Image: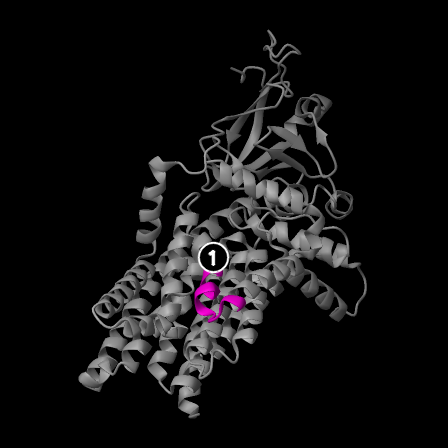
Amino acid sequence: MKKLSVFVLLILPAVLAFTAGILHYAQGPYWLGSNVDPEYLYVLSSLTLAESKQTDTTGNPGTTLQMLGAATMKISHALDFSGKDSLEFAVLKNPEFYLTVMNALLVTFNTLLLFFIGLTAFTLTKNIWLSLLVQFSPFFSKNILIDGLPRVSPEPLLLFSSLLFVLILMRMVLSKNLLKSAHLYMIILALVSGFGVATKLTFLPLLIIPLFALPKLRNKIGFLFLTVFSFVLWTWPIISLYENLFNWYYRILTHTGYYGSGGSRIIYLEAYFQNIMNLFLGNPLFFLVWLSSTGFIMIFRWTSLGGEKAKRKAVWQDNILRILASLTVAQLLAVMMVAKHPAGWYLIPALGLSGLMLFLMLLYLQRLGYFNRFHSKKVVLFAGIIFISVTAWGMVDIKNVFMQNLQIKQESLAVYGKVESEYKDYHKFYQVFLSSYLASSSPVCALAFGNYFVNEGRYSGSLQKIYGDVYFYNALNKKFYNWTREFSMENFILEGHGSKIVFQFPSIPEYGDRIICKRGSILHLKDVFKGQPETIYILDGITLMREENKETADPVSPFPDLSNVFK
């Protein structure tokens, strides 16, 4: 292989790694309110697994990421020869370090695999343009670049699983004797499929691809059985939680709202078809490739209908068309699945297949001799236009996301810095969880989110020892907590703490200038920062409620000189 070809095949993997780096820089630390979910769920559940304790499930199931996180923590901690802290204290004191290492590994895995895909394609086809085309797989949607690279979430592993499918299917297409090696491909596809589904259920539509691609019925049946075995293998840490997990999936399936909320109805037809359209239009390059593939299959299938029966059968026995058809169906099924609860990152497993689909279409045309009818310079020009268009489109998307995330990071860090510097002697309250997924930007708030939301307060005692007294507000149930217990905000104020309370909260209309407590009391707030997306409030007064949940005739003020502020 020429050195120049290897250098060319390194370009797109390098671009992928560079894009991940600049997006991570713009995104900021993982403890920012816009970044904590699901990063801090996984860092603490990975710690639980690393300590050989029963870990909880994030519901994705996500166990593959937990395993990676646990291995990362144990190796990183073992390499720290100072030995000052236990693994638990080391992770709780510096979770950002472990999250950064986990992300670096995820980006490295995807970068190396993308290079190996290009190298394999060039080895098998001797065509640098086809090799580059298949390497474009991660660049056909901004969702892959934004949600599949800078985060510590299932999405980078889903991209990795999708790219593994690309590599395996490409080798199957170019295999000289697929029947002889069908059993090996069956086993490999089952292992990858189980891994993908164990990472996140959104990988499920891709399981139809091996059912098309594998040549014999016994291979297809064997694939299904082995995939179930592989899923159990990759989800072994939560095998005792299967009942909870499947009940969770059942609620999602049978309810119209996100995460099993809403009415008892499988789909909301009034919005479902609009959601399908929005998912396609939100990923225009993905949609164009899918539409081209659909048309390509229909054209060659249609042209075979007028021929002899043997010729029509030969069309579908061709590995290229059969696998291309499976990819097209899988992408459609993915869109139909995601349209129930639409979000662009749910499509990442399907989005990663677009480069392979273009590769297969051009490879099929090459085998039929279509390119012999055109001047080679025109073919190169056509390929160049595709590359330039995809690159330009991606650069515009990345630039917009970079600037948006950079602004959010700067504003969030400014709020956090002001609270830490100007309100040192105040009792600080942070927003732990909100239905909009925007939490306060603070390292302790991020840890509280991960500690309570999945890990059921397992590390509350250790966090109390490390960080001392910190206070949190859960907007979902309107309750106040410290590290170890729920407490009454009314009592906290009446005990004499009311003059030194500051809230670092999202600046959203839900709050306005007040917080309604669980018992009905009203905390009156004063915005002293006027920030976006977060701001700083100080307590301006409280309206207490009696046992029967009625206002007192004379609201009680924690401040002797502020009795006139209550409404």
The reply, left or right, for residue 401 in relation to residue 189 is: left
Image point (31%, 48%), residue name: 277
Place of residue 70 in the rendered image (x, y in percent of width and height, measured from the top left)? 69, 61
In terms of depth relative to the viewer, which is nearer, 128 or 312? 312
Q: Secondary structure at mark 1?
A: helix
Disc 1 residue type (three-letter): Asp
The reply, left or right, for residue 426 in relation to residue 130 is: right
Q: Main secondary structure of the magenta part?
A: helix
Can see residue 97?
no
Quarter of the image for the N terminus: give it. bottom left
Place of residue 329 in the rendered image (x, y in percent of width and height, measured from the top left)? 38, 59
Q: Is residue 139 above or below residue 461?
A: below
Give the quarter of the image for residue 101.
bottom right
Q: Is residue 296 magenta?
A: no
**10 Å neighbourhood of mark 1: few (<14), some, or many (≥20)?**
many
Which residue position holds label 1?
147
Read off the magenta span.
207-218
The residue most toward the front is 309
In terms of depth relative to the viewer, which is nearer, 233 or 506? 233
Place of residue 510 in the rendered image (x, y in percent of width and height, measured from the top left)? 47, 30
